Image (cartoon, coloured by chain):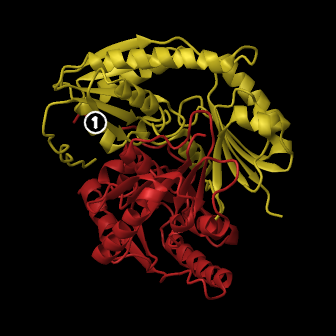
Chain colours: A yellow, B red
């Protein structure tokens, strides 16, 4: 592998805390970009946020990644924060729970960033792409708005689980010239397939929204895409619903949790 | 930079032509993933397709990338095809023109893949992400369906211009828990902002659809994102429309063409 070192970031005028929000891809270490490799090698403090939503192996995977990617001569340290889980059980004041959890998150991130020395660089490692269904950027905007600590933010885009899913299936997300919508399982379960859109990608589906949708949709489903436990199913939803249910249950019993994403498409008339 | 070599792809049973569709990101060389680096180093033939839509510097940029990334001890060659441009001038039978252009593309790709020896690997280098508004996968599916040549396809996902735009603006594509729609300028110009969706990303906008939209939308606009000529504009559309028009015209006169992408968002009520 021939890999010339890339030029460093342009130097900045005054010393200011620098916060990198680094997309590390959907789980496959090969999703890491050269930009993410450089960013990690400019990082003094790796921020690890445990949201309590998933197994501790995700924490370890990020640490392993840092140990593998960061030059051993470059010193770095870890600052960790535990936020606990926010879960949508469908039986409580979900919005209020989310608001309280979010306030705690803003405070915790403010502490992490405030703990940087003025010339240091800290990095949040984000699964997938920080610009798609990830709250880090919004939380950092709130921290900045609070005004207690001054810092710059740079975002390193990453391979989202949506891109990873489509790549593994070898399918294009949109039909030529047509739109594609990305939405959550929660919303799809409540509202069904949106009108006027033939291609819909579903993320964060704890609701198994695919159970109640039209048999005649095509589905490209994947769990743990790019990871050792990867499972892929594709075909007409009516034909694949049982298989997806079995795969999902098996993945959950094997790993204790499941991370899945899928593309739905109305068939051409 | 500490970068352990990644394991090679699993060996396959019988020799078969192998076609890689490699996302190389939105223009910034740092968008390249470790998977793309490995894929290029397993490539015997780099396929260059000139669609006549943009300047020859895009062709040279891909060649430069290969020379930079591929180990000099690994032999590779280039096979090139010129397709000419398909342009939507809004004054002809657009659909028929596209169909003829597409048939020529299927034939040309079939020749490229058919020109591989049985044990060789060829690679199409795709700007952005091959799964979003790129026709390579669909064309290869048609080549395979024609049945004249047998081959495997592997897709390496890439950083799309959509992700790159959002990263440079430090903005999340979706509001928390809400959907985001990706659509074309052609469709947006015809249909306006879609109902029920507050966040819309627009690609392939030769129509300058933003000219006719509601002043009270927020826009995050970018041209040549991640490239030396990058221009970014953000704010209320009514306030930024003139600036975007100027930036777009200036970019076009400087480069002879312009590649831009933008996120539109309805303001929270």
Q: Position of residue A216 (x, y in %)?
A: 85, 50
Pointer 1 indicates a residue of which chain?
A: A
Front-most of residues B232 and B60: B232
Front-most of residues B250 and A60: B250
Report whether A222 appears left or right of B211.
Answer: right
| Residue shown at 43% from the left, 20% from the top | A106
Report whether B53 appears left or right of A168.
Answer: left
Whether residue B265 is situated above or below residue A105 in the rendered picture: below
Report whether A76 appears left or right of B269.
Answer: left
Report whether A45 appears left or right of B94.
Answer: left
Quarter assignment of residue A138: top left
How many C-alpha atoms fall within 10 Å of the one at disc 1: few (<14), some, or many (≥20)? many
Whether residue B171 is situated above or below residue B65 in the rendered picture: above
Quarter assignment of residue B97: bottom right
Front-most of residues A1 and B164: B164
| Residue shown at 86% from the left, 45% from the top | A214
Across the whole image, how many numbered discs are drawn on residues? 1
Which element type, helix, strand or loop, lies under badge 1?
helix
Whether residue A90 is situated above or below residue B63 in the rendered picture: above
Q: Position of residue A140 (x, y in %)?
A: 39, 28
Quarter assignment of residue B48: bottom left
Front-most of residues A249 and A181: A181
| Residue shown at 55% from the left, 61% from the top | B133
Whether residue A159 is situated above or below residue B227 in the rendered picture: above
The residue tagged 1 is A39
Whether residue B126 is visible, yes or no, is: no
Q: Position of residue B174 (x, y in %)?
A: 55, 41
| Residue shown at 62% from the left, 79% from the top | B98
Whether residue B83 is visible, yes or no, is: yes
Quadrant assignment for the C terminus of chain A? bottom right
Q: Position of residue A158 (x, y in %)?
A: 43, 41
């Amino acid at each position: 592998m021939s890999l010339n070192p890339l030029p460093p970031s342009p130097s900045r005028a005054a010393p200011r805390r620098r916060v990198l929000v680094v997309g590390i891809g959907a789980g496959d270490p090969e999703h890491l970009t050269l930009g993410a490799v450089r960013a990690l090698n400019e990082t003094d403090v790796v921020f690890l946020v445990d949201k309590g939503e998933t197994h501790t192996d995700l924490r370890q995977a990020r640490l392993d990644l840092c140990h593998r990617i960061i030059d051993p001569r470059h010193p770095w340290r870890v600052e960790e924060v535990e936020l606990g889980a926010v879960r949508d059980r469908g039986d409580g004041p979900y919005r209020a729970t989310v608001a309280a959890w979010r306030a705690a998150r803003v405070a915790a991130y403010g502490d992490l960033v405030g703990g940087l020395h003025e010339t240091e660089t800290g990095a949040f490692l984000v699964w997938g792409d920080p610009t798609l269904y990830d709250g880090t950027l919004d939380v950092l905007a709130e921290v900045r708005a609070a005004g207690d600590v001054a810092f710059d933010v740079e975002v390193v885009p990453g391979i989202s689980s949506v891109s990873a899913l489509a790549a593994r299936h070898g399918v294009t997300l949109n039909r030529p010239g047509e739109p594609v919508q990305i939405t959550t399982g929660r919303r799809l379960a409540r509202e069904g397939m949106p009108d006027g859109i033939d291609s819909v990608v579903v993320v964060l589906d704890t609701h198994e929204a695919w159970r109640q949708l039209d048999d005649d949709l095509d589905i490209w489903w994947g769990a743990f895409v790019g990871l050792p436990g990867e499972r892929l199913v594709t075909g007409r939803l009516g034909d694949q619903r049982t298989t997806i249910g079995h795969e999902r249950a098996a993945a959950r019993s094997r790993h204790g949790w499941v991370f899945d994403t899928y593309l739905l498409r109305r068939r051409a008339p």
